[in-house]
């Protein structure tokens, strides 16, 4: 198959996403009082309602409705005041009642959008948009709807490859997850590259985390994505036949699965074949998609209004009450960090996109100068982040306090310690809760920055080596290393940056 970049020169990809997120920050399921708990013993959080036993009646979770409205407001959606739940025919064993309670044509949240700022390598996949001088561009992606439904249970296949039903000897069902409140966001088919799809999902995850409705754990399945993709010749406006990639559980899998499917469809079409509407599975190990089933149509679901659930009438007052609970969203926080502390856009976006980092940085940066705040941001994004990843811990599990990071940032910004020393101090801060100033003083780390003393030492060194000074000034610039080495010995504990500046100035003088 041809490479993706080559394919996208001739073909336009039309991509739409269906992103599911469980409302894991709630205590109970959507229509019953069973608790929500990942990893509990199988089938210990079930009741007649979520198992669909005869005579059991659902009672809606008000907090879940508030959560989906919060999600809609955060993604620029219109909130529909009157809506209802439907029953969707569901013929798989992971939903015991054989139907799924979901929403029909009109969802709680309709007609929204998110703006994607695409830059760097991510922008290279797109060939049909006007780009800025740095190659970046902004794409507005429409959101068709965000609707509420209940999640299905979990199938466990025994004996199959990679936990799949293919080749399994038997299958088990855990109904603990059945009935968990789940929101599904459906985009317009306006994404054009796998990178845009990845960025959209990443941005949505940041928003959901910021508003506190889900833990968005892709590893645990509380956030997952289906990708629909079709191809059409560049210049054409008609949609091609789409395929659906089911249950992408990582940003990389979403990108790589879509990229493969675009390349596969191009090869089929260019060889005179036709694309079938079907659901496909991405195999990361084999780096390919395989057919799961022929895609159902809407008629197959046999949807009708749920007779056990009354329609909703949301008042303006109630909606505005939810709006008042919206926190500052990542884009707004990014812009404020840039304006308040002069952070580069990329750094500000990375910090603002992480709830823990954003809160920690903002507390640490209070009272810092721009230079010091930038050092604090670098510490958090690079050194602290690397430590957390290496030790598989969260920021709150370390002994670091924002004030400690601020103190270390000041020492680094003022060149009181070297970057190498800074790493040692940071380790003590993270692991022992050390005070940076006290640690530096007790370990005699503080670097000499007395320029008068360093200049005097350099004058003496030059007087003792006038032949080398003259050779340097005649063009043997490599001799600067000799003077630098001698000065580092003479001014033990001196700031290397200050010493280097003085050595160069004196030799050139």
Image (tube, rainbow, N blue to C red):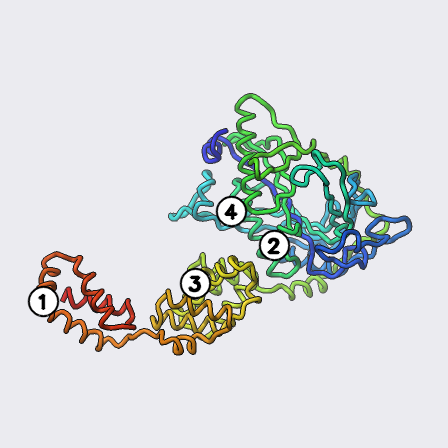
Q: Earlier in the sequence, mark 2 or mark 1?
A: 2
> Residue at label 4?
139
Q: Could you classify mark 4 by the number of other residues whose Cα lies within 10 Å: few (under 14), some (14-19), or many (20 or more)?
A: some
Q: Quadrant of residue 451?
A: bottom left
Residues marked 2 and 1 touching at CB (< 8 Å): no
Tag 1: Cα neighbours inside 10 Å, few (<14), some, or many (≥20)? few
Mark drawn on residue 444: none
Q: Are marks 3 and 1 in contact (CB under 8 Å)?
A: no
Residue 271 in the image: x percent, y percent? 54, 22
- Horizontal side of 64 relative to 76 (left or right) equals right
- Viewer-proximal residue, 241 or 217? 217
Which residue is tagged 1? 466
- Front label number (4 vs 3): 3
Number of the front mark, 1 or 4: 1
Going from N to C along the chain, the mark reached first, 2 or 4, is 2
Q: Residue furthest top?
A: 272
The image shows residue 123, relative to residue 295, as above or below, that is: below
Residue 301 point in image, percent of width and height: 77, 38
């Amino acid at each position: 198959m041809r490479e993706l970049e080559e394919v996208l020169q001739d073909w336009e990809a039309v991509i739409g996403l269906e992103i599911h997120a469980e409302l894991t920050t709630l205590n109970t399921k959507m229509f019953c009082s069973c608790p929500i708990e990942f990893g509990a013993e199988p089938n210990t959080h079930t009741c007649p309602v979520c198992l669909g036993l005869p005579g059991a009646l659902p009672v809606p979770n008000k907090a879940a409705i508030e959560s989906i409205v919060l999600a809609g407001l955060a993604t620029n959606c219109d909130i529909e005041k009157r809506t209802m739940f439907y029953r969707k025919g569901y013929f798989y064993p992971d939903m015991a009642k054989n139907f799924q309670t979901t929403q029909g044509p009109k969802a709680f949240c309709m007609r929204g959008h998110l703006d994607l700022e695409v830059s760097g390598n991510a922008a290279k996949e797109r060939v049909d948009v006007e780009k800025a001088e740095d190659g970046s561009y902004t794409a507005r992606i429409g959101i068709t709807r965000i609707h509420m439904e209940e999640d299905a249970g979990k199938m466990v296949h025994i004996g199959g490859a990679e936990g799949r039903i293919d080749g399994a000897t038997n299958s088990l069902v855990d109904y603990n997850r059945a009935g968990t409140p789940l929101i599904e966001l459906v985009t317009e088919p306006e994404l054009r590259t796998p990178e845009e799809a990845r960025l959209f999902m990443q941005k949505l995850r940041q928003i959901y985390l910021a508003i506190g409705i889900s833990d968005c754990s892709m590893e645990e399945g509380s956030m997952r994505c289906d990708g629909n993709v079709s191809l059409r010749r560049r210049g054409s406006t008609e949609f091609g036949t789409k395929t659906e990639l089911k249950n992408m559980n990582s940003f990389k899998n979403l990108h790589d699965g879509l990229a493969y499917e675009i390349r596969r469809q191009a090869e089929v079409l260019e060889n005179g074949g036709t694309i079938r509407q079907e659901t496909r599975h991405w195999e990361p190990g084999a780096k390919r998609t395989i057919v799961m089933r022929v895609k159902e149509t809407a008629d197959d679901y046999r949807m009708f209004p749920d007779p056990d659930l009354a329609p909703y009438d949301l008042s303006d007052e109630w909606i505005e009450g939810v709006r008042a609970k919206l926190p500052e969203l990542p884009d707004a926080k990014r812009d404020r960090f840039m304006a308040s502390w002069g952070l580069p856009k990329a750094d500000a976006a990375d910090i603002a996109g992480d709830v823990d980092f954003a809160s920690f940085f903002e507390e640490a940066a209070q009272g810092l100068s721009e230079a010091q705040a930038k050092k604090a941001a670098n510490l958090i994004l690079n050194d602290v982040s690397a430590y957390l990843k290496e030790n598989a811990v969260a920021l709150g599990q370390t002994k670091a306090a924002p004030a400690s990071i601020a103190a270390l940032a000041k020492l680094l910004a003022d060149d009181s310690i070297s970057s190498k020393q800074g790493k040692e101090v940071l380790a003590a801060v993270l692991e022992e809760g050390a005070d940076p100033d006290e640690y530096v003083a007790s370990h005699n780390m503080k670097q000499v920055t007395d320029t008068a003393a360093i200049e005097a030492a350099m004058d003496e060194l030059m007087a003792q080596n006038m032949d080398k000074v003259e050779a340097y000034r005649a063009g043997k610039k490599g001799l600067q290393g000799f003077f630098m080495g001698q000065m580092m010995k003479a001014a033990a504990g001196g700031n290397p940056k200050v010493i280097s500046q003085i050595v160069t100035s004196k030799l050139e003088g």
